[in-house]
Amino acid sequence: MKIAVCIKQVPATDSKIQPTSDGKSADLSSVEWVPNPYDENALEEGLKLKEKHGGEVVVLSLGGAKVEEAMRTALALGADRAVVLKDDAWPGAEALDVSAALASLVKREEPDLVLCGKQAVDDDQMAVPAMLAERLGWPQATVVVKLIVEDDLKSARADREVEGGHEEIHLSLPAVIAAQKGLNEPRYASLKGIMAAKKKPIEVLAGGDLGLADPSRRVEVVAVSLPSQDRKNRRIEGEPAEQARELARLLHEEEKLI
């Protein structure tokens, strides 16, 4: 079974983000870059499927100068090889163009299954997996918390997390699966895996190698600012029932939240 896992490199969730002096972007000069947390669940699921069914796991990504760092992390965890579109034209590209680039990489690899995180934690657009499936003409399932690939490797069952419960759907393969937290518990890289990753191949491509023009749509950040610090904490005294009534009154009358 050949499994492709799409991984995006994002700022670590505990990074201290500050606006630039002009207030038009975020200063990312001191930020630690890591694989997208939801993509870690996708990779873990790919590795588990490989352990069960055999085959290989190839990780795919696109980005600028540092994109290979996330690939080394994935290789240390157990992925077999990596293919990256390393081109300074692609960071900041709009989701529709990103899905086109990933579709080109997927078609080149011809996998039986594509795994993605349900969204990237930097922009939270949650759009690329569905767009990728549409471009490939494959069935898809998003916010997946359980995945079973049948032994014939021709179909799968996915348990989706939906409002108020779960939804089980059946898909033919190949398909695109977008992982939600709870699908699994990502493993940690071992020292042996870290050392082995140094010898695993990372194939680096440019947009022209895939017949791709530079992205025509880009996300424009208009302004970046820190949350307001004007509001102060308020302590509500009294018995629990009185505190609850007063909290409800404050939220309704003063904060206009309920």
Image (tube, rainbow, N blue to C red):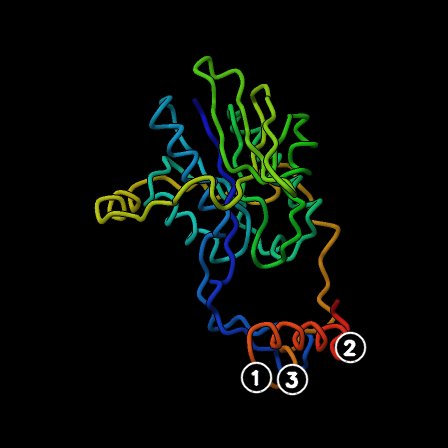
> Furthest residue to the left?
192
Task: Tell me which residue sits at (41%, 32%) in the image.
Answer: 57
Q: Earlier in the sequence, mark 1 or mark 3?
A: 3
- Cα gap from disc 2 to disc 3, whole angstroms: 16 Å
> Which of label 2 and label 3 is nearer to you?
2
The residue that disc 2 covers is: 253
The amino acid pointed to by label 3 is Arg
Q: What kind of residue is marked 1?
A: Glu
Tell me residue 143's x, y (percent): 58, 40
- Residue 77, given in percent of the width and then of the height, sits at 33, 43
Kindly identify the amino acid type of the residue bearing the numbered disc 2.
Glu
Residue at disc 2, secondary structure: helix
Residue tagged by mark 3? 231
* Residue 236, above or below 151: below
For marks 2 and 3 on the same chain, the one whose residue lies earlier in the sequence: 3
The residue depicted at 48 percent of the width and 53 percent of the height is 67
Dot 2 crowding, Cα within 10 Å, few <14, some 14–19, many 20+: few
Percent from the top left, x then y, of residue 22? 68, 81
Residue on which disc 1 sits: 237
